C-alpha cells in the first residue's frame, strides 16, 4: 500500500473518532518539559505506534541550553482556615505554575497575591504559566475566583519535587527504502491544553499509525519532545546525521476550525515547501502559506542558521495565536474532530508528494509518441478526471528530459500531483517513461 492509498483508504469518520478519543484520553495528564506526566503521555502513544524513549540527564548541555532538574508534582492547593481548598490542583493542573518549586507555608492573602496569576480581560479563564529556568512558584486562577477569596490566612502547599533526573523524548521510526529521512515533530510539554499542543501530538501519532505498513521511499521519524529544550537536545544528539534529513514538518495547534496554515522553512524553496504549497493550492480556499519567521514553535530551532534544515510548520489558528491560547479556554471544546482529521489528511498529502516525487526520463524523447496506439486514452475513459489525466500524459512526456520531477510537472501544468503521478505510472507501464529517484541531494 502506498501513502496515496493510505490517504484515500482512510475512513474519515473513524479517523475523526480515533483522534478525538486519544485527545480525551491524554488531555488530563499534567505534562511538563520533564517528569512523569511527559513519560506517561509517551507511554500511551507507544501503545499506538512503536516509540523509542530517550532519557537525557539533568545538566546535559544542548548548545546554549542545559537540561534542567526534573519536575514532578503530586498535589497543590491554597486552603482557608477551615481546610477548604480555594485553589486546587486536583480541579485543573493549570492552577499551578508549571515547574513551581515545592512550597509549604501559611501566609496572608496579601502576601500570596504576588504569586497569583489571572487574566483580567477574560475573568472566567485560568492562565497557563511556566517558570522552567527561574526558581519560582505560583498559582493560576480565574479573575472571578480570585475576587471571591476573602482576606485572611491561607495554607499554601505545592507538593512537588525539582531535582536531578532526566528529560524524556520519544521517537517513532518507520524505515523506508532510503536511509534519508523525513521528520515530523510535535512539542509534548503542555499540560491540559487541547490545541496547543495535544492536537499536534495526536496528529503526529495518527500520521505515524497511518504510515505504518505503507511502502514509502523515505524513512519517517516522528519526534515527540518537549518544546525548545527537547528539540535542542535532539538536535545536539543527532548533529552528525542531520544531512540525512530531506524534509520535515513541525506540527502545532492543529485542532481548531481555523484555516490550515503552512509556514515555509527558513530556506523557503525546499521540496517540502513546494509540496505543501502545491497541496494547499489544490485544497479548499482559505488555506494560507506564510513565510518563515523566527517565532512560533520548534521550527525556530530546526531552521536556525547553524542547521537551516528543510523543515516547515503546519498550524491552524495557532499561527497568530488565537485568544484562547495558553489559557483554560484552550480546552477540548476549542478543537474539533473534523479539523484534527483534516490536518492529518493534508499532511499525508504533503508527505505523499515529498515521497513520490522523482525525476522523469522519456524513453521516446524525439517527437510525441502515439499514445492512442498504446491504449492510454482508453484506460482513462469514463473517469471524472479523464481530461486532466490525458493532459497529464502530454505534460509528463514533454517534461521527461531528465531534469524535471513529477512535482515540477504538477506545478507547471497546474494539475494535481496525484493525477500527474497516475499518468506517469501509465506511461511507465508501456515503457515510454522511466522515473529515477535522483532527488534533491540524493546520493550525497
Ligand atoms: Zn504553547
Image: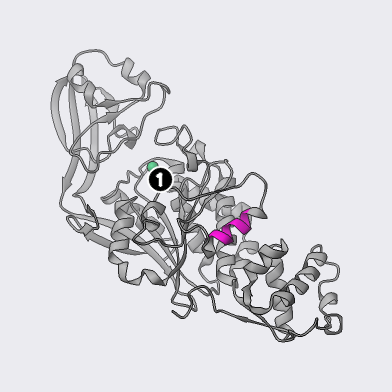
* Residue 164: percent from left, percent from top: 15, 52
User: Which quadrant would the N terminus be assigned to in this image?
Assistant: bottom right
Q: Is residue 81 visible?
A: no
Q: Residue at x 48, y 35 (%)?
A: 322
Which quadrant of the figure shows ligand 1?
top left
Q: Is residue 257 left or right of residue 183?
A: right
The extreme left residue here reads 105
Q: Which residues are magenta?
A: 273-280
Q: Secondary structure at mark 1?
A: loop
The extreme top residue here reads 151
User: Which quadrant would the C terminus be assigned to in this image?
Assistant: bottom left
Q: Residue at x 63, y 58 (%)?
A: 278
18 lies above or below 123 = below
Number of on-image labels: 1
* Residue 388: percent from left, percent from top: 78, 65
**Residue in the foreground of this view, choosing between 144 and 185:** 185
* Residue 281: percent from left, percent from top: 65, 54
Residue that numbered label 1 is attached to:
295
Q: Is residue 106 left or right of residue 377?
A: left
Q: Residue at x 19, y 37 (%)?
A: 159
333 lies above or below 271 = above
| Applied colour scheme | one colour
Q: Quadrant of residue 439?
A: bottom right
**Residue in the foreground of this view, choosing between 156 and 64:** 64
404 drawn magenta: no
Q: Is residue 171 visible?
A: yes
Amino acid at each position: 500500500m502506498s501513502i496515496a492509498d493510505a490517504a484515500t483508504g482512510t475512513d474519515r469518520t473513524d479517523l475523526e473518532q480515533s483522534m478525538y478519543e486519544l485527545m480525551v484520553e491524554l488531555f488530563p495528564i499534567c505534562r511538563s518539559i520533564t517528569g512523569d506526566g511527559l513519560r506517561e503521555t509517551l507511554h500511551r502513544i507507544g501503545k499506538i505506534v512503536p516509540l523509542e524513549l530517550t532519557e537525557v540527564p539533568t545538566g546535559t548541555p544542548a548548545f546554549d541550553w542545559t537540561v534542567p532538574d526534573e519536575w514532578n508534582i503530586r498535589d497543590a492547593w491554597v486552603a482557608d482556615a477551615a481546610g477548604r481548598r480555594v485553589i486546587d490542583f486536583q480541579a485543573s493542573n493549570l492552577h499551578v505554575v508549571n515547574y513551581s518549586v515545592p512550597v509549604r507555608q501559611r501566609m496572608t492573602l496579601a502576601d500570596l497575591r504576588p504569586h497569583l496569576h489571572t487574566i483580567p480581560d477574560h475573568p472566567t479563564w485560568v492562565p497557563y504559566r511556566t517558570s522552567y529556568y527561574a526558581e519560582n512558584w505560583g498559582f493560576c486562577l480565574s479573575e472571578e475566583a480570585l475576587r471571591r477569596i476573602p482576606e485572611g490566612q491561607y495554607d499554601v502547599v505545592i507538593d512537588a519535587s525539582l531535582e536531578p533526573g532526566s528529560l524524556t523524548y520519544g521517537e517513532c521510526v518507520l524505515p523506508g527504502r532510503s536511509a534519508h529521512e523525513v521528520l515530523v515533530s510535535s512539542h509534548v510539554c503542555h499540560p491540559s491544553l487541547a490545541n496547543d499542543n495535544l492536537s499536534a501530538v495526536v496528529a503526529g501519532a495518527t500520521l505515524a499509525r497511518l504510515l505504518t505498513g505503507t511502502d514509502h521511499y523515505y524513512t519517517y521519524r516522528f519526534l515527540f519532545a518537549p518544546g525548545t529544550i527537547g528539540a535542542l537536545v535532539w538536535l545536539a544528539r543527532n548533529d552528525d546525521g542531520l544531512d540525512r534529513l530531506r524534509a520535515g514538518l513541525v506540527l502545532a495547534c492543529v485542532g481548531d476550525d481555523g484555516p490550515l496554515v503552512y509556514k515555509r522553512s527558513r530556506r523557503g524553496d525546499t521540496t517540502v515547501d513546494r509540496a505543501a504549497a502545491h497541496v494547499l493550492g489544490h485544497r479548499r480556499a482559505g488555506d494560507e502559506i506564510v513565510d518563515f519567521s523566527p517565532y512560533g514553535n520548534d521550527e525556530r530551532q530546526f531552521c536556525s542558521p547553524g542547521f537551516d534544515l528543510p523543515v516547515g510548520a503546519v498550524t491552524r489558528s495557532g499561527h497568530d495565536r488565537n485568544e484562547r491560547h495558553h489559557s483554560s479556554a484552550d480546552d477540548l471544546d476549542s478543537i474539533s474532530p473534523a479539523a484534527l482529521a483534516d490536518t492529518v489528511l493534508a499532511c499525508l498529502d504533503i508527505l505523499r508528494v515529498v515521497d513520490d516525487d522523482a525525476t522523469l526520463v522519456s524513453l521516446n524523447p524525439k517527437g510525441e509518441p502515439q499514445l492512442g496506439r498504446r491504449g492510454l486514452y482508453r484506460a482513462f475513459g469514463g473517469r471524472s478526471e479523464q481530461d486532466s489525466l490525458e493532459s497529464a500524459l502530454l505534460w509528463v512526456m514533454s517534461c521527461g528530459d531528465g531534469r524535471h520531477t513529477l512535482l515540477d510537472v504538477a506545478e507547471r501544468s497546474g494539475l494535481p500531483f496525484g493525477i500527474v503521478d497516475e499518468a506517469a505510472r501509465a506511461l511507465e507501464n508501456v515503457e515510454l517513461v522511466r522515473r529515477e529517484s535522483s532527488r534533491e541531494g540524493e546520493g550525497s
